[in-house]
Image: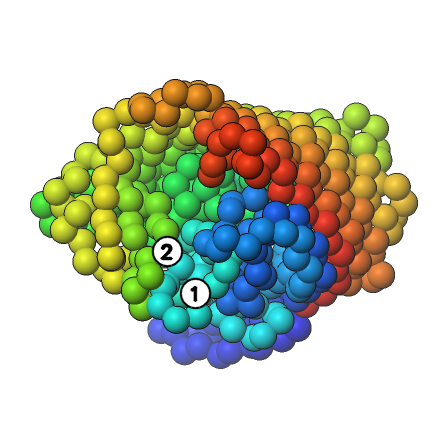
Amino acid sequence: MKKALLVAVSLSAVSGVAHADVSLYGVLDLGVVQMTNAGDISPTFVTGAVPTGAQPNTAKFGTVRGMMNGGESQSRWGIKGSEDLGNGNKAFFQLESAFSLGNGTLATSGLAGGAGTPSMVADTALNGQLFNRMALIGLSNNDLGAVTFGRQYSLQLDIIGSVGGGYDPVNAQMFSPINFSGSYGGGGATDNSRVDNAIKYAKKFGNFNVNALYGFGGMATNNSARSNAQLNAGYEADRFGVQAAVQSAKDTTNISPNAAPNTVNAQYLNLTSYMLAGRYQVIDPLTLKAGYERMQLSAPGDPTGDLAMTQIYQYNIGTPSAWGTAQKNLNVYWLGANYQISPAMKASVAFYDVSVPAWGTTTTNGTDKYTSAMLEYNLSKNTNLYAAFMLDKKSGNFLATSGPGAITNFNTYGAGLRVKF
């Protein structure tokens, strides 16, 4: 991480004087995007536009051009720090917030209704929190590992974006359906890509790693309701890596817009998801990456308690609902490659396939296929240019409407500048 600010803070302690290192860091990413079959670009939405082809809340469809906020990386700033406690022990913290670089506002899902409701909205787990990406404190020991407390990434989102250099071949939020902070990064429920009120344990044994996470639900009548349990194990070597993860979330939510001011609709469900991802460096410039994710959405365990909730995050709940008795399964596959053309230039390509078998009263299967490519050019150690596209073709129960007038293609093209500090 590149440090723009390093402050040595003297702290008094019974045993003497310790020092805490605090650093300010961030990413600034802004670009121009063109999208087909899209509504108006919204400056209040986390990326400016929904890259995964979700039809917006408007009858206007066509080609749109505008600014995208974070084509490659989400624009963010953060503060992190650590204090050496001696004998291999350390205390640390991290606070990180995403914002819209184009207008300087806090990045949100744009789901709250009322006047000025954005044309493009999607639940992204960024719902108006001050430190919407993460807010945690922790303790670590060289031999025992690290324990962190607070708002944290899901273990599956870690695999997609950061562990082993990221197992998403096109690791860009506007040009990859699994990198965009929506349902796939959360394992199937859109607000699960980050877990609130969570305890996480992380430990490495040579090239092996083990992670466990548990998010507390805090429900008085049912300790498992609103809880989230996750496990991850993997192996990372120079040329080869593999990661596996499982998640079980009870009474989690999918959130959608409501026309009333500061109000959203909430659907409650149980979620089980699995992920397996691998990478292999064939030759020095070429790395192959592949993965599979299985998601199972089913009826919530505590619908009575769920439907009694009146607020979620800072929003009022307008229309609560519970998932029905039929289980919905989603299967996500991806395969791609990174090629280092030169020390300054890298090319990435990938294919993503999402399939949903018929379920409940839905009698048709659905497919959602993406082809993505990105070219990055480093101007310096901290600054790069990028250009990318993502072609999205939907069929079956992924379509909002059926018949001759159904919109099946949602394509995204863009270029931008990213600066890290």
Image location of residue 217, percent across then percent down: 23, 48
Colour scheme of the rendered structure = rainbow
Position of 110 relative to 198 (above/below):
below
Mark 1 Cα shell of 10 Å, populated few (<14), some (14-19), many (≥20): some
Dot placed on the residue nearer the N-terminal end, 2 or 1: 1
Q: Is residue 404 left or right of residue 211?
A: right
Extreme residue in the front direction:
404
Rendered-image quadrant of the C terminus: bottom right
Q: Which residue is mark 1?
A: 117
**Residue located at (73% from left, 45% from top):** 389
Q: Which residue is mark 2?
A: 257
Which residue occupies the foreground of this view, 411 or 215?
411
Image location of residue 77, percent across then percent down: 56, 68
> Residue type at mark 1?
Thr
Which residue occupies the foreground of this view, 401 or 152?
401
> Residue type at mark 2?
Pro
Q: Is residue 340 left or right of residue 350?
A: right
**Residue located at (28% from left, 25% from top):** 326
Position of 33 relative to 362 (above/below):
below
Mark 2 Cα shell of 10 Å, populated few (<14), some (14-19), many (≥20): many
What is the distance, in whole Å, between disc 2 and disc 1 at their CAs? 9 Å
Extreme residue in the left direction:
221
Contact between marks 2 and 1 (CB within 8 A): the answer is: yes
Q: Is residue 298 left or right of residue 203?
A: left
Image location of residue 309, percent across then percent down: 18, 53
Image location of residue 89, percent across then percent down: 45, 55
Q: Does dot 1 land on a helix, a strand or a loop? A: loop
**Residue located at (41% from left, 78% from top):** 12
Which of the 4 image quadrants contains residue 165?
top right
**Residue located at (47% from left, 21% from top):** 365
Task: Let me know if residue 257 appears in the view.
Answer: yes
